[in-house]
C-alpha cells in the first residue's frame, strides 16, 4: 500500500455542500389541498372540448404543422424519428385519447422545449433529448404534451383567440364549422402572435397530472417524471438561457415536482420504484445526437439490459482516453479487480459518469482534470476531499487517464449504494451514497 493510500485509508471524507445551491424542490413538504383534485373527473375534460369537432382539430393541427415546418428544421434521421415516435406512442396509447393520429417530430434546436398545437402533433427539441439522462425523462415530456391533447387545451386556445379583436372574425367562423382556409389563417396568426402554445398554469398542471398516469400505465417508472423536473430546475439555475421562451408559461419545476411527488405518494405508491427508467436504445439515440457519456445505464428493472460478453481477454489493453468505457469493458475491469456485483456506469473518459441509486440519480464527473466530485441529479455537487487537521486534499489522486471504470453497488433495498472507482493500477476506491451525501469507505 502506498503512502497516499494509507493516508486515504486513515482519513475521513468530508462531503462539503458549502456554497452549493440547494434546490428546494425535495425539501418542502406539500401542504393544503392537492392541486390535481380538480382534474380527476373525465366528464369535465370531455366538456372542455367545447365546439371543436375532431375533424376541425385535425385540420387545424395539419395547418399548424405546415406553418411550424416553415419555421423549424426537423431531424430526418429515421432511427431518431422512429425512436421518439415509439416512446411517444407508448404513452399516448394508454392516454385518455388513444385514437388520435399521433405524430412526434424532433426539432433540430438545442434550446429546451417541447410543444403541441393539438390533433396529436407533438414536437420536441433535440436540446431536451440531449439534456435528458434517461428514456423515462423523454417519455415524461412527451406524456405531458399528450396531456395537452387529452385535456383539449386547443379548444381553450381557440376560445381565447375568439375574444381577441385581431382574430374575432376568423375564430368565429371556425367554431361554427370553419373552412380549411380559415383554419389555416388562424393557425398562422396564432403562431405569429405567440399565442398558440401559451397555456394557463392549470392547463400545465393538468398535462402533468395526465402525463404522470400515462407514464405509469405505459410501464415507465414515475420517478423519471420527478427527475425531469429536477433536471429542469437544475438547468434553470445553471443556464436560464437554455430555455425557449415558451417555457415561461409552465409553473416552476419545484412546484411541478411537489405536485407529482404528492400524487405518487397518495395514489401511485411504489410506481416510483418500478418500471422502465431507461433503455440501451436511448443511449444509442443520444450518441446519434452527438452526446457522449450523459445517459444513465439501464437497470435490471428496465428489462433492457446491455448485452453481456463472455471474455477471457484479460490482456486486452484498457481503452485510451476519450474512448467510451463500455459495459463490457467495465464488467471485465471489475471482474479482473475481483469485485463482485458492481453495475458499471457508462463512462467516457474525461466526461460524465452516471447511475441510479434507489430513487436518486448520481452522476460522478471530473472537474479540472481530476476525477473527484460527485453530483446528484438536482445539481448538488459533492466535492470529494480529505480533511486532515484542517488541510484539504483531493481524495482521488487520479487523473482521468488513470480511471478505468466507475461502478455502483446497491446496498440493501434503500437508497444506499457504493460507488466504486477502479484505477489503472487496479486499486479501487469505494464511497457510500447515504441518500444525503457520499462517505468514503476506503480503498482495496
Ligand atoms: Zn405544457
Image (tube, rainbow, N blue to C red):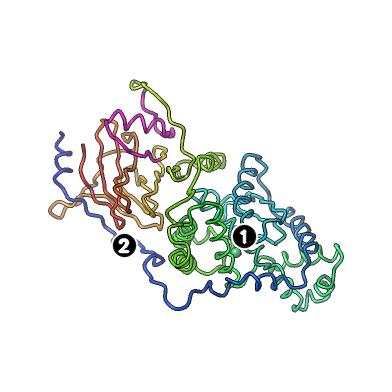
- Residue 182: percent from the left, percent from the top? 84, 66
- Corner quadrant of residue 21: bottom left
Q: Quadrant of the N terminus?
A: top left
Q: Could you tell whether 186 is left or right of 123 in the image?
A: right
Callout 1: SS: helix
Residue 370 position within the rendered picture, expressed as x and y whole percent measured from the top left: 31, 43
- Which residue does the numbered mark 2 point to in the structure image? 19
Residue 145 marker? 1
Which stretch is magenta? 317-345
Mark 1 sits near ligand 1, with its Cβ under 8 Å away: yes
Badge 2 density bin: few <14, some 14–19, many ≥20, Cα 10 Å: few
Q: Residues within 10 Å of mark 1 (few under 14, many from 20)?
A: many
Q: Is residue 325 above or below residue 205?
A: above
Residue 280 higher or lower than 130, as above or below: above
Which element type, helix, strand or loop, lies under badge 2? Answer: loop
Q: Is residue 194 visible?
A: no
Label 2 – label 1 distance at C-alpha: 36 Å
Q: Where residue 158 appears, x then y in whole percent?
A: 74, 71
Q: Residue 98 appears in which quarter of the rendering? A: bottom right
Q: Is mark 2 within 8 Å of ligand 1?
A: no
Is residue 316 shown left or right of residue 49? left
Determine the residue positioned at 69% across, 51% down: 103
Please state which of residues 328 and 307 is positioned toward the viewer in this rendering.
307
Image quadrant holding the C terminus, namely: top left
Which mark, by number, is residue 236?
Answer: none
Q: Position of residue 84 (x, y in %)?
A: 61, 47
Q: Does residue 332 appear in this view?
A: yes
**Which residue is painted at 49% across and 46% down in the image?**
278
Q: Look at the numbered discs 2 and 1 and tell me whether their residues touch, using CB distance below 8 Å.
A: no
Amino acid at each position: 500500500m502506498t503512502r497516499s493510500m494509507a493516508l486515504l485509508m486513515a482519513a475521513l471524507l468530508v462531503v462539503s455542500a458549502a456554497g452549493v445551491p440547494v434546490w428546494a424542490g425535495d425539501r418542502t413538504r406539500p401542504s393544503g389541498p392537492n392541486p390535481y383534485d380538480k382534474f380527476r373527473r373525465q366528464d369535465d375534460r370531455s366538456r372542455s372540448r367545447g365546439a371543436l369537432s375532431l375533424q376541425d382539430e385535425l385540420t387545424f393541427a395539419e395547418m399548424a404543422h405546415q406553418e411550424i415546418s416553415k419555421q423549424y428544421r426537423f431531424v430526418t434521421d429515421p432511427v431518431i424519428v422512429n425512436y421518439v415516435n415509439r416512446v411517444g406512442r407508448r404513452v399516448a396509447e394508454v392516454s385518455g385519447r388513444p385514437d388520435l393520429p399521433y405524430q412526434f417530430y424532433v426539432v433540430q434546436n438545442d434550446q429546451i422545449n417541447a410543444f403541441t398545437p393539438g390533433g396529436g402533433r407533438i414536437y420536441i427539441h433535440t436540446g431536451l433529448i440531449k439534456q435528458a439522462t434517461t428514456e423515462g425523462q423523454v417519455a415524461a415530456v412527451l406524456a405531458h404534451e399528450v396531456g395537452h391533447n387529452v385535456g383539449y387545451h386547443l379548444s381553450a386556445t381557440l376560445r381565447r383567440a375568439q375574444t381577441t379583436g385581431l382574430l374575432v372574425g376568423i375564430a368565429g367562423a371556425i367554431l361554427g364549422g370553419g373552412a380549411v382556409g380559415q383554419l389555416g389563417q388562424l393557425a398562422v396568426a396564432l403562431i405569429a402572435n405567440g399565442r398558440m402554445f401559451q397555456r394557463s398554469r392549470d392547463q400545465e398542471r393538468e398535462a402533468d397530472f395526465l402525463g404522470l398516469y400515462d407514464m405509469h400505465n405505459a410501464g415507465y417508472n414515475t420517478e423519471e417524471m420527478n427527475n425531469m423536473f429536477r433536471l429542469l430546475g437544475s438547468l434553470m439555475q445553471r443556464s436560464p438561457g437554455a430555455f425557449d421562451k415558451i417555457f415561461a408559461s409552465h409553473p416552476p419545476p419545484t412546484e411541478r415536482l411537489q405536485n407529482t411527488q404528492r400524487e405518487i405518494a397518495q395514489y401511485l405508491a411504489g410506481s416510483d420504484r418500478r418500471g422502465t427508467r431507461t433503455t440501451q436504445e436511448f443511449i444509442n439515440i443520444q450518441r446519434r445526437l452527438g452526446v457522449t457519456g450523459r445517459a444513465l445505464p439501464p437497470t435490471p428493472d428496465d428489462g433492457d439490459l446491455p448485452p453481456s460478453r463472455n471474455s477471457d481477454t484479460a490482456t486486452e489493453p484498457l481503452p485510451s482516453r476519450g474512448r467510451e468505457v463500455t459495459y463490457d469493458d467495465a464488467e471485465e475491469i471489475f471482474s479482473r479487480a475481483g469485485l463482485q456485483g458492481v453495475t458499471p456506469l457508462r463512462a467516457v473518459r474525461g466526461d460524465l459518469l452516471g447511475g441510479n441509486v434507489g430513487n436518486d440519480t448520481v452522476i460522478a464527473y471530473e472537474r479540472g482534470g481530476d476525477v473527484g466530485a460527485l453530483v446528484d441529479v438536482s445539481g448538488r455537487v459533492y466535492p470529494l476531499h480529505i480533511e486532515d487537521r484542517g488541510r484539504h486534499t483531493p481524495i482521488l489522486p487520479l487523473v482521468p487517464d488513470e480511471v478505468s471504470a466507475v461502478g455502483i453497488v446497491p446496498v440493501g433495498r434503500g437508497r444506499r449504494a457504493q460507488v466504486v472507482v477502479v484505477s489503472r493500477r487496479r486499486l479501487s476506491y469505494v464511497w457510500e451514497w447515504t441518500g444525503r451525501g457520499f462517505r468514503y469507505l476506503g480503498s482495496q
